[in-house]
Image (cartoon, rainbow, N blue to C red):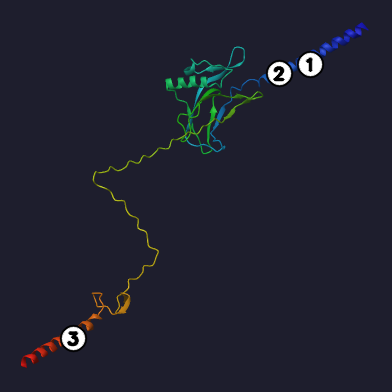
Amino acid sequence: MNNRFKTSRISIVVSMMICLLFFMSTMALAAGPGKVDQTAKGSFSIKFLDSDAKPITGGNVEIFHIASIATDASGNDTYVLEKDFIGLTIDFDNLGSPELADKAETIVNSESLSGITKAINASGIAYFDNLELGMYLITQPVAIDGWYKMSSYIATVPYNDGDKWIYDVSSIPKMELELVEVPVTTVTPEPTVPGVSTPSPTPTIPSTSTPTPTPTPSSSMVGGGGTGTRIPQTGKLNWPIPVLSFIGAALVLTGWSIKKLDDDSYEK
């Protein structure tokens, strides 16, 4: 009974150890995709897109080889800094930090180093192929018109995605639209000369009404509260003429009669 119990306990312990060893071996495989093929070549495909996923074209991208991949004394893959970047301290747990890219770019600028330059094509892609494996600084020397300059960053080729090494690495940097100020045009008024006024032009408004024709003077018109014929150029009526003629004739006749009577009285 006791032997059977002991044998059962031993079987359980052995089974648990086998399961634990299997679990540990699985974790070890998941920790890394194996050794890097140091005879291979790599590539970078850097794609520039706007917020609508449309390509941004124009300009160049320049990359700098910071470190190569080598095998250390223990047989592990490791990074070895290039001679121009010997003084660069790298935190391998934080390769994507902006501070590391800034330090590497400071060395590039202070030493006036030259890298590999590729143009951004019509698809918005700068493509670098046949690259030595290792660590690179990715920069944009000049900003694309209408956009801020891309922030420099560190990238490695190959890239470990947890399951395998990727030798053709793609990245899409974040691009920010540049706000361009629109110049304000100031209109300077013309100087005013004392005593001289500039007349404002009077707008001509075309007449939409039909002008009333000017009446032509005729020989018979209504005026003065009665009807009559006007004398040209005077505007007076001609009815007084016969009246005055009659009065004048009457006065002449009266004068002649008086003179006649006086003559008859003298003769007597």
Q: Name the residue under label 3.
A: 250
- Marks 2 and 3: which is nearer the front? 3
User: Outermost residue toward the right?
Assistant: 1
Name the quadrant of the N terminus: top right
Q: Where is residue 5 in the image (x, y as percent from the top left)?
A: 90, 8
User: Outermost residue toward the left?
Assistant: 267
- For mark 1, does the 10 Å Cα neighbourhood hold few (<14), some (14 to 19), or many (20 or more) residues? few
- For mark 2, does the 10 Å Cα neighbourhood hold few (<14), some (14 to 19), or many (20 or more) residues? few
Check disc 3 and give the amino acid type: Ala
Q: Where is residue 31 in the image (x, y as percent from the top left)?
A: 67, 19
SS label for mark 2: helix
Name the quadrant of the C terminus: bottom left
- Pick whichever of labels 2 and 3 is earlier in the sequence: 2
- For mark 3, does the 10 Å Cα neighbourhood hold few (<14), some (14 to 19), or many (20 or more) residues? few
- Marks 3 and 1: which is nearer the front? 3
The residue at 6%/90% (across/down) is: 266
- 171 vs 20: above or below: below
- 241 vs 90: above or below: below
* C-alpha gap between disc 3 and disc 1: 168 Å
Q: Which corner quadrant of the image does residue 167 belong to?
A: top right
Check disc 2 and give the amino acid type: Met
- Pick whichever of labels 3 and 1 is earlier in the sequence: 1
**Does 16 sit left or right of 77 as displayed?**
right
* C-alpha gap between disc 2 and disc 3: 159 Å
Q: Mark 1 points at which residue?
A: 19
Mark 1 and mark 2 in contact (Cβ < 8 Å)? no
Q: Name the residue under label 2.
A: 27
The residue at 91%/6% (across/down) is: 3
* C-alpha gap between disc 2 and disc 1: 12 Å
Q: Where is residue 26 in the image (x, y as percent from the top left)?
A: 72, 19
SS label for mark 3: helix
